[in-house]
Amino acid sequence: MSEQHPEGGRPAYDVEAIQTKWQQVWADLDPFKAKDDDSAERRYLVDMFPYPSGDLHMGNAEAWALADVIARYWFQLGYDVLHPIGWDSFGLPAENAAIKRNEHPATWTEVNIETQADSFRRYAISFDWSTRLQTSDPSYYRWTQWLFLKLYEHGLAYRKGSPVNWCPNDQTVLANEQVVGGKCERCGAEVTKRSLTQWYFRTTAFNQRLLDDMAALEGHWPDRVLTMQRNWIGRSEGAHVDFVIEGRDQPVTVFTTRPDTLFGATFFVIAADAPLADEVVTRARREAFTAYREQVGRATEIERLSEGRDKTGVFLGVHATNPVNGEHIPVYAADYVLADYGTGAIMAVPGQDQRDWDFATKFGLPIVRTVQPSDDFDGEAYTGDGPAINSSNDEVSLDGLDVDEAKARITDYLESKGTGRGTVNYRLRDWLISRQRYWGPPIPVIHCPSCGEVPVPVDRLPVVLPELKGAEMQPRGVSPLAAASEWAEVPCPRCGGPAKRDTDTMDTFVDSSWYYLRYPTPHDDTQPFDVEAVKRWGPVDQYVGGVEHAILHLLYARFVTKALHDMGYLDFVEPFTALMNQGEVINQGKGMSKSLGNGVDLGEQIAKYGVDAVRLTIVFAGPPEDDMDWADLSPGGSLRFLQRAWRLAGDVTSEPGVDPTGGDEGLRKVTHRVIHDATQLLEGQRFNVMVARAMELVNATRKGVDSGPGGADPAVREAVETVAVLLSLVAPYTAEEMWSRLGHRPTVAKAGWPVAEEALLVEDSVTCVVQVQGKVRGRLEVSPDISDADLEALARADEAVVRAMGEATVRKVIVRAPKLVNFVVS
RNA sequence: GCGGCCGUAGCCCAACGGCAGGAGGCACACGGUUUAGGUCCGUGACAGUGUGAGUUCGAAUCUCACCGGCCGCACCA
C-alpha cells in the first residue's frame, strides 16, 4: 500500500521502512521511562494488563491505542508519566494448554509474553519497559502471598465451610462475582453447589465504605460501572425481627425491608437449603422435607432463577409466633428464599409482597392487607405507599401512618420490646479465593494436626509451586498440588511436627488486585511495593480497560486498597481516580469469534495498512467508549490521510526555528484554532473529534501550500509542525518521520504541546444571522465586538430582513451579539 | 417487570438552546493529473435530526408520551 515507486526521486512514504527505522531509534532513546525525580508533575496511567493467550488482538489494539493517546498527551505536556506494562500470567488457559501439550504452563506463557511484548513494541505504545512484570513469576507472587498473610493477620482472610459455587467444567470453586446468570464467567458452564471448606477474603468488612467512597469517583468513572457496583453491593435498609419457633430455645431472626407490614405476616419461610430448616422440621414432616430439599438441590441455578416459576415449598410442621400480635403462623421451607441472603428466613406478608402472595395463593394461606391501596388499584400484592391498616395491638398502632412513618414507629416499638431492631443488609458476600487448580499462587498456610492452621512465615516466602506438567495438572476436583506429596508434606513452622501445606491456589483476581502498587518498584525484592514510591505515584490517575471488569477486578482492587490503607501502607482509599471503558471492536454487527468466522486479525491489518493507520482508524472511529464495527471503518482512508500529512512535511521549505510571526495570517488562525480545540477535546477525551480537527488543519495547509502563500511561508511550517505533534499521539511513526523531515531531532513525542495564541483566536469578522420569527432571513458580516444596539440597527436595515418583515409590527427583538438577531413580529 | 443510555445523509461520526451551505471521514459521481489503474488535486450530489405533542423569540439539544436499539438489575425479603 505504500508508495513503492517514487516519481522524480521524491522520497516515499514507506510504511515498513519507517516502522523499522523508528523502532530502533526509540529502543535506543527509551523516551518513555519514568524519571521519578521531582523534575515535573507526575501522572500515572495504567491499562488493565493483558492475559498472555497468544498474540495481541483487535481488542487489545483498541484499548492501548486509546490509552496511549492520553499517555502521549501527558508526555507532550511535560509531565513525568508512569505508563507501565505487565502480564496477568496466571490462570486457566495456560494450564489447559499445558495439559494438552504435556508441558509446563510457564513454557506457553513465556512464549506468548515475548510475542505480545514484540507486538507492543511494534505497535509503538509509550511504555516504560523497565516496569515489565508478570504475576506468575515467583518474584511477584511471593508478594501476592504476602498480601494474603497481611489480610490473614488483620482478620480479613479466613477459612470456613459453606455451600460454594462449583464449576463442573473447570473443576474448581468460583467466587460469587464469577457466576454470571448461573453460569461460570470464564467458560459458561452451569454452576452447581458444593459444600466445601475454603478461604475467603472479608470484602463484607468494607461494604459501606465500598459504597460511600464511590462518591469521589462520580464523574470520573462511567456511571454504569458505579451503578453495577452499587447493585452488586446491594445495600438495603430494614429491620431484624425475632420470631419464636416452637421447640426451639433461640428465636429466629428475619430481615425485612418492610417492618411496617409485620401485622400482615401470615406465614414464615425458611430457605430449603438452610441448616435451620433441617433443624426445625418435625419428625412427621421430615420425609416430605428431605424429598423437597433434594429436589431443590438438583435444580441448577439457571432453573432456580427462571422467571414466573411456580412457587414450591413444604410445611415443616411447626409454627412461629408473630411478635406483635401473637399469631401462630405456619413455617414452610421453600426455594424462593435464599439461604445466603439476610438470615435465610423471612416473614411472609402476602398482602404487600407478590412472591408471598403467589405462595399464599398456592398453599391456601390467609392474606391480610396492612397498607390501604388506592381506589384504582386492581393488582394483587400492594407494594406502594398508603395508610397502614389492620396494624395495631394493645401497645402500638400503625394505623393511618404512611409507610415511612409506620416503619419508624414499629422499629422503635420492636427495639423497646427487644424483639427487633433497625438494620442494614448487604447483598455483597465475602470473596472466595481458594481454587483447586495448579497455575496460581499457592495459599501460604500449613495445616498442622496439633497447631491448626499456621501461616507460612513471611521470610519463608515465596511458597513456590511444585514442578508439575501435563497430566499431573489434570483437574480432578481436588487441587493437583495435593498429589505432589514431597511438596505438600512439610514440618509445621510452629511446632516442627509433620504437617501439610494448603494445596489450593489463589484466585488469579488476587494477583491483579494489587499489581498497580508494584509498578513503581517492580524489581524490589525486599517488599511488595515501596510505600513512598506509591505515595508519589498513586493512586492511578487514569485506568483504562474493558467494562467486563466492572464488578470483579475493580471491586477486588478497591477492597485490597482499602485494606492496605487501613494497615497504614497507603495514603489513599481508592486505587483508580479515573476510569475509561473502551468499547469493543466488532465486525459486521457481531462480536468477533472463531465460530462466526468474522474475526479481524490485527497482524494482518497492520501488515496491510501499517501500525499508524490501524491506530488512527481506531481512535477516529468514534467516542472511545463506543463499540466500533470494523466493517464500517476505513483503515485505507486513514493511510491516505497519513500520507497526505506526511507529504506536507516535504513541502516546507523554510528553516527550522523560523519565526511564524508575519506568516500567512489566515493559515495561522486555522492552526491556532485547531490547537485550542484539540487541547480541549483531549481534556474531554474526545479523541475522534481531535483527529477531525487535525484533518481540518491538514486540508487547510494543503491549500496553503498549493494555492495560498506556498511552502516557504513560515505559517506553513508552523501548521505542519502542529500536525506532527497532534499526530504524535495517534500515529507515532508518521509523526516522527514528519518531524525528522522538518529538520528536527527525535523525538516528536517530547516536542512539547503547542499553546494557542489568544490573538489568533479572535476572528476579524463573524457571520451574524438575522432571524424573523426564528427563521433565518439574512446574514451580516460584523465585527466580533459589535454592540447589541449597533447590531440591531444593522439588522433592521438589512434588505432581506425588511422584506421578510413586511408590514408586521416588531414585538420583540432578541440580540445575541455578535452572532444572532431575532425579530419577533406580529 | 424496574432503571439507565442512544436514534442526525447510503455508512461512521460532529454540532455552549442560536446558520444542519453538517466539523471530519468512508462510499459514490464528475472534472483535472496520469500511458493506464491507483495515488494526488478539485468539484458535486445526498439528511432536516425515530414519531407525536409541549416549553421557548428560537429545539438535534430541555419536558412528556410512543416506536426502535443497546446496557444494567431482577424470587435479595
Image: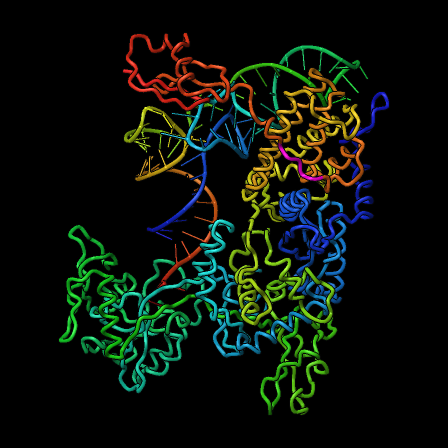
- Where does the image place residue A26, in percent across and percent down from the top left? 79, 45
Residue A755 among those drawn in magenta: yes
Q: Relative to A666, is A512 above or below? A: below
Query: Looking at the image, which is closer to me, A608 or A47?
Result: A47
Q: In percent of the image, x 77 and y 24: which residue is there?
A: A652
Query: Looking at the image, which is closer to me, A258 or A728?
Result: A728
Residue A448 sits in quarter? bottom right
- Where does the image place residue A592, in percent across and percent down from the top left? 60, 46
Query: Looking at the image, which is closer to me, A237 or A103?
Result: A237
Q: In percent of the image, x 25 and y 58: which residue is there?
A: A383
Left or right side of A813 for A375? left
Point out the stretch of residues depicted in magenta: A752-756
Residue A146 among those drawn in magenta: no
Q: Main secondary structure of the magenta part?
A: loop
Query: Looking at the image, which is closer to me, A557 or B46?
Result: A557
Q: In percent of the image, x 72 and y 53: which residue is there?
A: A34
- Where does the image place residue A671, in percent across and percent down from the top left? 64, 27
Q: In percent of the image, x 47 and y 71: which residue is there?
A: A205
The quadrant of the picture occupied by the N terminus of chain A is: top right
The quadrant of the picture occupied by the C terminus of chain A is: top left
Residue A629 sits in quarter? top right
Residue A819 sits in quarter? top left
Q: Relative to A217, is A273 above or below? A: below
